[in-house]
Amino acid sequence: MKAHWRAGVGVLIAMALGVAPSLARSSELSGGSAKDAARVLEIYARSPVLVRTGERVRLPVDAVCATAQGDPCSWAVTLRTRSGNAGEWRATTASAAPSLEFDLSAPASRAPGDDGSGTVSFSLRATGPRGLVANLPSRGDSPPLRFFVTTNLPMVRAPSVPFGRGRAGRTALFLPWGSGPARAGLELGRESATLGPSSFDVDRAGRIFLADAIQDRVAEFDHGRLVRQTLLSMGARADIALTGDGAVFVMDQDRAGVGIRRIDPRGRLGPAALVGGGVIGQVRAVGEQGTANVLPEDAWTSVAVEGGGALTRAGIATGRPIAPGRELLRVVGEHSLRLATVAGEKVVDPIEVRFGQRLGELALAEPDGSNGYWAVVHVWRDHPAADRYEVVHVSGGRLVGTFAVGDQRFADTPALARFRLGRDGSLYQLVTSPAGMRILRFDLGRES
Amino acid sequence: MKRSLAFVGCVMAALLVIPVGPALATWVGTNCTGTHVDDHYVKRSEAQAYSAAASGEGYEWGGGCWNNNDKDDTPGAPDSSGEGADCSGLTFKTWEMENEIGKSGWEYWERLYNVHGPYTTSDFHSPVGSDPFYKLADKKVSTTIYMDAFAKNGHVAMLYIDQGSPNGTDLMIEALGDAYGMGKFYEGYRDQSEFIGVRREDWTDDCWPNCANASPDVVTVD
């Protein structure tokens, strides 16, 4: 309707101005041609990830349908759900609506088994004009998505730490902005984001691997000195993860989708493998495999190294693989953080941490190696404006320790790339200032 | 008023100069043959679709013209009257604003019409009463709606969909920079204190003109 309306007005304006609209222009405004065919159909859903039995469970779903000209088109979505592993699949269809949500409280209530935990599996299909289809999960050979339900989800409260009070880290690496091996690339924002290093990771010896996206390199630093670099073109949101043997997985996205590459321990860059068609999330390593989180599916696709360096898909998991048969679940809300492990399809060591302050992103979530977790959440306030991070250590269903660290940002570092738990056991933070980028180290043996 | 007069001056000067000489071998001079029309009853879903089609195109500081072919036609050529918009230009065109500071109303800009608009990120970050957009009192998930924006001095990005990720990040549509063009990325802008929430005024409800028979927002699964 609007396209026709636009066409009419466009012609009238053109006539009033005494200007004959070009064919291209009138074609674009008139619509109805092949150009009007839906070109974009995307589907998005935010998994509840981990819910407590009896809670109201909502699955928000969005779809975006657009023609080549950028006009919206209609869509409908079908949700298929199954409680537990043996129940029947049920399909529910809904028309396009803003803020569409599916209430999954009933399937969730049926999910837990005798052991108190269970799953609800689901998949989504959006249909648009002329047979256009979009699916979640996006690949036909992927298992359905799922979220976990547990009867046992202990809750602890994090103490409120005043803004301005926090632990100072030690500088592990400082690079001034600029070009060259001992500098970090910076693209100053001019009506755009200010872009610097996109990610980093730290090995067992404290060596820092930096994704210096602007300088197209992954650089390795030992005590502040560059020891090696591998050149490769990366996007501003590329993420990296280090394996135990010193290989680096690099995750990036382009028009083809989200891909992953591997730099072997000798610094040689291997071929890319496509891991999904969505938006880049994060990459981590488990053993010698890489595992890539692609959004909005929020599933983790593991890749293994074949002979010759080729990467092959080695499995898809709901949670982040952290060890053979074990996955880490995490979900953050405005005032709470939930963490759990999936072992043998059961939820173990679940915990909810509630905060008095508003939370932003979950900047880090890692197992602590003894049935607990380290997590870093962004805490912020508007008046007066302030940001900081809260580091929490939970174990055995209780809060073991917590401390605050400051925030210093000049470049728009990706939200999930600011912290890493190094393989040396220390926590690291990437901060930026007008002078350069700095990686700070925090000793975790000294919790508050 | 916090107007970046110098920047606007540069943009206006560029826009005045570039179309004059079609013989100039710039991408804009060769390709930007689009037009614009008055518009009414503009919905967020229309803005979302407009931005969806723009994803994958190039970035150009002070620019505002692209061709929806899913690639940057002028890669590695900053400030060359190349393809793409910057972040405030993308927001301006997506929000169908009038090309005059403080003017209310709606104007549909074809993707191939080169216009940046008069607003910079500092304007989006510090709206004044006459602007066709305003600062949101809160940035909670429950108080923002898709196609609202988060702005700081230097960058502005639009919320592409209502829902965030389990990590607490939001899917934004933004002009990220010369090397990366316009695209969709999960970002933590909502929760950075330097960003404010900004809303275009006077959107027409997505359900219009059939709001009485609108589809339910919540569908219960048995």
Image: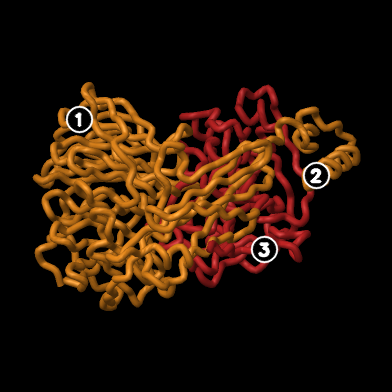
Could you say whether the residue bearing mark 3 is in a helix, strand or loop? loop
State how far apart marks 2 and 1 are (Cα).
Answer: 56 Å
Point out the frontmost of discs 2 and 1.
1
The reply to whether the C-beta atoms of the residues labelled 2 and 3 are less than 8 Å apart is no
Residue with the mark numbered 2 = A6
In the image, residue B219 lies at what x, y percent? 58, 62
- Check disc 1 and give the amino acid type: Asp
> Residue A264: which disc?
1
Q: CA distance from mark 1 to mark 3?
A: 52 Å
| Chain identifier of the red chain | B
Q: Give the alpha-carbon distance from disc 2 to disc 3, as whole Å.
A: 21 Å
Residue type highlighted by circle 2: Arg
Name the chain under label 1: A
Q: To which chain does the residue with label 3 belong? A: B
Circles 1 and 3 on the same subunit: no
* Crowd class of label 3 (few under 14; some 14 to 19; many from 20; radius 10 Å): some
